[in-house]
Image: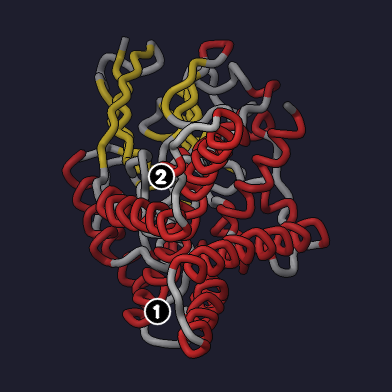
Amino acid sequence: MILVRTVSVAIFVLAQNGLESVIGQGADLKLFLLAFLTIYGGFHLLFFLRIRAAIAMGQGGGAVLVILMAAGFSAPLIIRAAEGVISDSLARVIAVAGYSWMAFLLLFVVVCLFVELYNLGMIIAVNRCNCHISSFVPTAGMRFMIPAALAFILTIYGSFAAGSLRTEFLVIHSGKIPQKIGKIRLLQISDVHLGGAMGERYVSRIIRAVRDANPDIVVSTGDFVDGRGEYANEAARKFNEITPRWGKFSIPGNHELYLGIDKAAKFMDNAGFVFLRNRSATIAGVVDLAGVDDPGGVRKGKGALGDRDILSPANPSHFKILLKHRPEVEKDAVGLFDLQLSGHTHKGQIFPFCIFTKLAFPYHAGAYHLPGGSLLYVNRGAGFWGPPIRLLSPPEITVIDLIAK
């Protein structure tokens, strides 16, 4: 079980970090990069072999196919290299095409696996049972067309699902909320991943949902910004127009650290967020917000305090909220906070990869009751990393009503 979870963590780190974040971060992550390129290259090779077996093509057609496969394989690197160099609109077109191809190819491989299991079963049945069912054995054309068609359909569906932002509600009754206040409405956004394929349409939808919820406080639990360009500046200006009664607060996720913490801090300031890095803020005299850095900051040489260090100075009579990007719970901090808000997992983003994220992070999505009266809520994320696709993991913002008991 430990080995399975370790492999799952490695797969999730590769999927979430992106190639540019792995380069230059030490030997271990360079090995991760090598593993990713090997696996992703293997996926392209499988697609190439399947289509060549299904469709007859001459040398010219084969050469064109090789060029297209090479472009698809190098798309993640091309996207990052193009960002900030060419126009934002063109960079976004390249990102949508490149990342959508990545999602299609991943789904193609998954469906191929099931088709091959079926094919193996049919071959065994024909050989052992001497049954006349050879017509049920898929041909080379079917072994390509079935996975390709299903992967294409799921990719199209997932692109629409990525835009179906949901508002989830959580109600918490607490004696720490005074009767004279009655209710405090807090709104959590997480994992917007502004940049790459995340365009103005998605950002406008998130902002509209935040306005409709009419929160008293807005908090971002990391991975808000994930790219460079004028669209990031424009998005910051739009978020700055949202002015909740008791302000907006944010913490860095791993992608803010990859982007550069200074650039991320500037974005947060332009967007009107107070950046809580290993410190806390008191809201309305009754709520303490404690923000901690993502553990990725340790690899970057920034250092990080433990959750207990941040929470201990808090007023015990206040309702304590821990803002922590990754849904990891420190044992010695349980009971010191009333609510921990996290994100990071995306609930896998694209099924069936939720299997790996669930193994990597047992606190996967939704609410979890912890010892000592603490509660953890894991947000699925309002945006997406990489492919503008979500499959059985709809994006969300979370409205949390703290009500006097």
Q: Amino acid at mark 1?
A: Ala
The quadrant of the picture occupied by the N terminus is: top right
Q: Nearer the viewer, residue 203 or 139?
A: 139
Q: Position of residue 112 (x, y in %)?
A: 50, 50
Residue highlighted by disc 1: 91
The quadrant of the picture occupied by the C terminus is: top left
Q: Is residue 346 visible?
A: no
Category of crowding for the residue at label 1, using alpha-carbon neighbours closer than 10 angstroms: few (below 14), some (14–19), many (at least 20): many
> In the current view of this chain or complex, which residue is farthest to the left?
212
Which of the two marks, 2 or 1, is nearer to us in this view? 2
User: In the image, is residue 99 above or below residue 364?
Assistant: below
Q: Give me the disc on residue 358.
A: none
| Quadrant in the rendering for residue 25 | bottom right
- Side (left or right) of 303 relative to 184: right
Q: Kindly indicate whether the residue at mark 1 contacts the one at mark 2 (C-beta within 8 angstroms).
A: no
Q: Nearer the viewer, residue 344 or 276?
A: 344
Q: Position of residue 220 (x, y in %)?
A: 42, 46
- Side (left or right) of 220 relative to 7: left
Category of crowding for the residue at label 2, using alpha-carbon neighbours closer than 10 angstroms: few (below 14), some (14–19), many (at least 20): few
SS label for mark 2: helix
Q: Position of residue 184 (x, y in %)?
A: 29, 28
